[in-house]
């Protein structure tokens, strides 16, 4: 499990992208529970592959990022004062010892309650599982964020995945070397322990491998629960390798925040730090011939949303909002499509309340979309 020592040299550009996405999500996630009307007793962040805390140049790794963002959140005004627990596991003994030293630095004293382990992943997920997958009637309410920066592809098995996605108030980010699956796709043993099937490999390329891998994990989602997964693909080695993060949340608030971060990073697709579809898109310079145009992500989303609204499969603001999240798009994208349909007189004039505040709470009351015949569904 030790694998390659990724901390024997400074973080490369792709690692910095990954860590920046993690930082931005932690920054968005913590204040939710510091200011929520229903306050958890504990905020818990689990880092299962923590490393030594910093790279050779002193650049913050995931454990220090979590500590920095917790400190930043706590200095701001907040209504709740839950315990904050940071669970850090590092399998390699030398890195583990450095990590302990880093967390003892004066600036982190008294900031959180630390839990350290120096275990194999299979052992530590069993040990810490009860802390984030508490029974529904457990008197201790926790809000959990799991970061699983695995070295490779095989640690997130189906039992582990199910344990995570069925845990209440639990979001996760896990890293997977998707291009490894593509490179060795004719060797089934290299995708053992993953949900990848032969059908997923048809048309898989280095560029789209991570998107295909994320879609495969959707088959492992329990059919009885509402759940959101989204990928972000990261090019490495000048594009010859593609790795990525898969984000998961059982609540619209989680996926909404993650997608906002992704669309800030990738304004064309919200999905990668490179041209994932090979479209060479320049929205100000269309193709010379219309037949050469490749529909981009937002065009496909608009087409599909129009069809589902006009067929009345989606006929409320809440249904449209959740459809957008499942498609990896934002509420504003959905609202733009509906307003365009009004301008084209496909729908009567009306106001659309499509946002997390209007649609994302579990008790949100759906508002019917008005149709030309005056009816809803």
Image: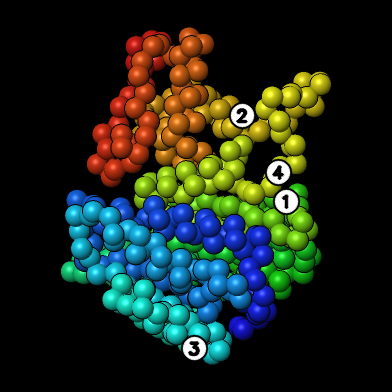
Residue lying at 56% horizontally and 89% vertically, measured from the top left:
94
Q: Nearer the viewer, mark 2 or mark 3?
A: 3
Q: Estimate the spatial distance between the alpha carbons at disc 2 and disc 3, rounded to whole Å.
A: 51 Å
Q: Which disc is residue 299 wearing?
A: 2
Q: Estimate the spatial distance between the alpha carbons at disc 1 and disc 4, rounded to whole Å.
A: 8 Å
Q: Are marks 1 and 4 in contact (CB under 8 Å)?
A: yes
Name which of mark 1 and mark 2 comes first in the sequence.
Answer: 1
Name the residue tied to disc 1.
207
Q: Estimate the spatial distance between the alpha carbons at disc 3 and disc 1, rounded to whole Å.
A: 38 Å
Name the side, left or right, on which 248 lies relative to 14.
left
Residue lying at 37% horizontally and 23% vertically, measured from the top left:
352
Crowding at dot 1, Cα within 10 Å, few <14 / some 14-19 / many 20+, comes out as many
Name the side, left or right, on which 11 lies relative to 247.
right
Residue in the foreground of this view, choosing between 101 and 347: 101
Name the residue tied to disc 3.
97
Q: Position of residue 92 (x, y in %)?
A: 56, 86
């Amino acid at each position: 499990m030790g694998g390659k020592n990724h901390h024997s040299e400074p973080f490369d550009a792709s690692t910095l992208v990954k860590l920046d996405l993690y930082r931005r999500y932690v920054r968005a996630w913590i204040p939710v529970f510091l200011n929520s009307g229903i306050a958890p007793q504990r905020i818990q962040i689990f880092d299962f592959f923590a490393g030594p805390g910093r790279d050779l140049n002193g650049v913050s790794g995931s454990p220090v990022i979590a500590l920095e963002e917790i400190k930043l959140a706590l200095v701001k005004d907040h209504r709740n004062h839950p315990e904050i627990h940071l669970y850090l596991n590092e399998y390699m003994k030398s890195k583990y010892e450095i990590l302990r030293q880093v967390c003892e630095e004066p600036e982190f004293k008294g900031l959180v309650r630390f839990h350290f382990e120096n275990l194999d992943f299979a052992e530590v997920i069993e040990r810490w599982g009860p802390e984030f997958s508490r029974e529904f009637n457990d008197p201790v309410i926790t809000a959990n964020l799991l970061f699983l920066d695995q070295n490779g592809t095989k640690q997130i098995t189906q039992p582990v995945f199910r344990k995570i996605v069925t845990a209440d108030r639990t979001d996760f980010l896990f890293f997977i070397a998707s291009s490894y699956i593509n490179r060795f796709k004719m060797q089934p043993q290299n995708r053992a322990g993953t949900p990848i099937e032969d059908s997923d490999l048809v048309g898989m390329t280095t560029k789209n491998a991570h998107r295909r891998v994320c879609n495969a994990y959707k088959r492992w989602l329990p059919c009885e629960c509402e759940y959101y997964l989204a990928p972000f693909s990261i090019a490495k080695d000048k594009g010859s390798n593609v790795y990525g993060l898969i984000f998961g949340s059982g609540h619209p608030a989680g996926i909404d925040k993650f997608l906002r971060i992704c669309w800030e990073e990738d304004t064309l697709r919200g999905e990668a730090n490179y041209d994932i579809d090979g479209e060479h898109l320049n929205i100000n310079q269309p193709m010379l011939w219309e037949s050469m145009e490749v529909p981009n992500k937002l065009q496909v989303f608009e087409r599909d949303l129009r069809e589902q609204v006009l067929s009345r499969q989606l006929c409320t603001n809440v249904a449209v909002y959740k459809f957008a999240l499942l498609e990896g798009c934002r509420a504003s994208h959905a609202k733009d499509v509906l307003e365009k349909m009004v301008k084209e007189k496909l729908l009567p004039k009306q106001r659309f309340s499509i946002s997390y505040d209007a649609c994302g709470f579990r008790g949100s009351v759906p508002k019917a979309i008005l149709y030309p015949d005056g009816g809803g569904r």
